Amino acid sequence: MAAEDMQQILVVDDDRTTLTIIERILSRNGYRPAVFASPKDALAHFADHDCDLVLSDFFMPDMNGDEFMREVRRLDAAVPLVFLTANEDTRTAIELVKAGADDYINKPVVEDEILFRIGKTLQEREHLRQIERAEQERELLRLEHEKLVNWRALYAAKDVHQTEQMIDLLSRTINQAGGFMWVDLLRMTTEPIDDEHVKISRGLVDTILTSAASQKEIFDYITFISRVDTFDLDIRRYELPELLPDLEGHMDTTLGDLCARHTRTKLVLQSGEVPAGAVSVDREYLMRIIHELLVNAVKYSPEGSRILAYTQTSEKEPGGIDIVVRNSPKLTKARDADGERVRGIPYDYSELVFDLFYTIDGFPTELEEEEWGDGTGLFVCRKLLQRMNGWITTGNGVDYTGDTPEPFIRFTVTLPPAEKHAGRD
């Protein structure tokens, strides 16, 4: 089995002998151990790597097991976590399980027991994931049975409540143009002329054409967003000193035109010292993505507010760049769990659903400058960036530099260094 296909077990124990024993047991039984004597080093590794299970000692000098568990759960609420405890600490182990640990193993370590406990915990967690997926699938099948829209392929394992709101909006959009009422009218009002012809009213013909045009628009929209992954991209390597001035010039010109037409003010910050390095992108599509994000910033900001755009050395990808677009938020048509209209980005929305649901205001709120309208903008941008090995992160924030605190929405496009794109589309 290839190393990348093995399940990775993160092990932390300040006792080097125990650590070595566990590492050998796991390695010769098909697991990929990542072992650490320091809880802080273990957490740093956990933050940057996918781990299938965490195995931790409880009594450690730098950080006790309960604190370590809180930090792990803060980074990943679902990863299985098993504690190592001494025989006399069974009460402590039980309290840890009550607090969120999945199991515990008594020291000294016995190979058969540690393998049994790890295997059992991994199986139980996978079983829970399968149950959750089955519940979501059952709900999506119910929606299909009601003949709304088949979103299963797009929203598998996503938030069903948000999907229902999406489907409801699409359904209402279709029904505003008459829905499928024309089918019943056609059955009831046609008069036969001969064996091959029937007579229908001009009004019914107009209703059918209007309804069909509306339905075609909706299903063209669905077809379009399902085909984003098939767009032809011309991905090439670009040196940052060559790309960034063009990119900043594009942002400055585009945002200037948008702000002049829609009564906003712009601020495009120029890079000081342009960093060395390179990124691999489709330059034309990158410019179109930035254009769409700037249009989105105008679309979801109040009149008279300021829009900020700039590039910087990436905070999370050494050697890469971040492209940041920031705007003041306004109330959207989306509503939170309490039924209140959302201002800014709803933190509890799943990423893919958010991209479409948040921008679904695009149906009643359109800008002629949009290339990917009807609520598809952020979805298309994210999918295209994935093809370039990049991504978008979103978030709310507050600017305290002025006289009064000002909330803002931030979209950050991250492009990793070109070396990370080798071998990818």
Image: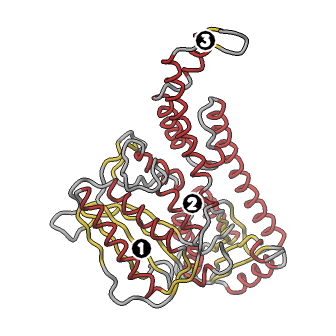
Q: Amino acid at mark 1?
A: Ile
Q: Quadrant of the N terminus?
A: bottom right
Which residue is rendered at x = 59% and y = 58% of the image?
228
CB under 8 Å between discs 3 and 2: no
Q: Please tell me whether residue 317 is drawn above or below residue 162 in the rendered image.
A: below
Classify mark 3: helix, strand or loop. Answer: loop
Residue with the mark numbered 1: 323
* 88, 30: nearer the viewer: 30
**Which mark identifies residue 231?**
none
* 198, 380: nearer the viewer: 198
Residue with the mark numbered 3: 190
Q: Amino acid at mark 2?
A: Ala
Mark closer to the chain start, 3 or 1? 3
Decide if residue 188 is on the left or right side of residue 67.
Answer: right
Q: Nearer the viewer, mark 1 or mark 2?
A: 1
Residue with the mark numbered 2: 77
